[in-house]
Amino acid sequence: MYSAEVKALINEGSKAYSLRDYDLAASKYADACAAFNEEKEKDCPDLLLLYGKALFQSGVSKSGVLGGFSASNQISKNEEATAEEENFEEGMANEESEVAAEEEEEGVEAGAEDEEQEEIAHNNDDNVNEQEEGAQEEEQSDFEASWDILDLARALFEERLSGLDQKADGLAVPYLKSDQDIPTNEYLVNLKKLSETYDLLGEVSLESENFPQAAGDLESCLEIRKKLYDESVSSLVSESHYKLSLALEFCVEDPQLRAKAAQHMKNAIGIVEIRIKNESNETKKEDDAQLLQELEERHEELKKDPEEEIRNQQMHIIKGILGEATSEESGQAKLVSVVQSKVNDLSSMVKKRKAQPGGPGKKQKK
């Protein structure tokens, strides 16, 4: 099917991909796509899938580097600036005994040095900002290019499958015995690749925060995988439920989709629970148990009403404010009570004088 040149490029791309050199892998796969197109005068969806996947992984790998790159440079610059300031202050302390003219001269030189250092620091900041902006633009172009390439692959796979309908006759759902089952039927081979293409399209849209598009592609992937695999135990089906739930959760324009997201998360939980019961490998069982716990936590969060959560938080804040006010009032009341008790104690210590003759309560003699 492929020429020697295309095969060589595919092998080089696969090797680079296995070494996680995604830029090189994408470059080799791009060359393979171009060579195939030049030879056959058409595009190959299989090669486009490899190319789009490498571009996506390249974008993901770069998205995790930007923050660290900027922070490390900033720390380095701060340490250099601190050392320069300490050296400058030490030099100024040693010059305190010099005459006024020398102090003035040193001050001028120090000022010039400060201006020079500030200019260098400013230039370094500009260089860092330019590098970050360039990396961000490259990251965005990777995701955008990946989506375009994968979308073209999707269209070509669907076109190819439309001509293979007769090879799907007589197939029973699920088409494959397990997730690891390698199909030999040409229709199933391409259907499996189409499901992978939809899955990658959904992931690209998630990374780009285009959640409605991600939900649409991931739902298409789920529907295909439910035909390919046993949806009661397939890890690929549970994975699709999870990703679709994630996309729907962030489709905030439609609040009703949150309930749908919770249902897909529940479906993923059900599959993992069955898999744990059927699993004999203790290591895999422990991994699934940990996964189950994480899924259940997310499911509980999805079941909560966001508006009610906001109201509860507001009430908590109000109660906190009122609690402080009540605490202050009770403190003041307690202080008054203490003062009054002290006054009463003082009153009890005062001796009462005897009533004088002619005083109240005693009749005077006439």
Image: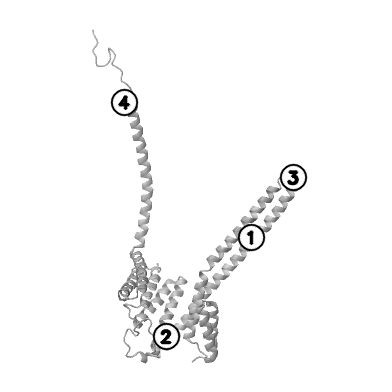
Who comes first in sequence, dot 1 or dot 2?
1
Rounded to the nearest whole Å, what is the CA distance between mark 1 and mark 2? 55 Å
Disc nearest the viewer among 3 and 2: 3
Look at the numbered disc 2 and give the secondary structure of its residue: helix
Badges 1 and 2: C-beta atoms under 8 Å apart? Answer: no
Residue 308: x, y in percent? 34, 60
Q: Which residue is mark 4?
A: 348
Disc nearest the viewer among 4 and 1: 4
Who comes first in sequence, dot 4 or dot 1?
1
Q: Residue at x 36, y 59 (%)?
A: 309
Q: Residue type at mark 1: give it.
A: Ala
Q: Which residue is mark 3?
A: 100
Q: How is the image coloured?
A: one colour
Q: Residue at x 58, y 70 (%)?
A: 134
The residue closer to the viewer here, 359 or 174, is 174
Label annotation for residue 158: 2
Disc nearest the viewer among 1 and 2: 1
Q: Residue type at mark 4: give it.
A: Ser
In the rendered structure, the answer to whether residue 143 lies left or right of residue 286 reads right
* In the depicted structure, whether residue 26 falls above or below residue 331: below
* In the depicted structure, whether residue 242 falls above or below residue 29: above
Q: Residue type at mark 3: give it.
A: Ala
Badges 1 and 3: C-beta atoms under 8 Å apart? Answer: no
Rounded to the nearest whole Å, what is the CA distance between mark 4 and mark 2? 100 Å
In the rendered structure, the answer to whether residue 42 lies left or right of residue 172 reads right
Rounded to the nearest whole Å, what is the CA distance between mark 4 and mark 1? 77 Å
* In the depicted structure, whether residue 18 falls above or below residue 327: below
Q: Residues within 10 Å of mark 1 (few under 14, many from 20)?
A: some
Q: Is residue 255 visible?
A: no
Who comes first in sequence, dot 3 or dot 2?
3
Q: Which residue is mark 1?
A: 121
Residue 219: x, y in percent? 38, 77
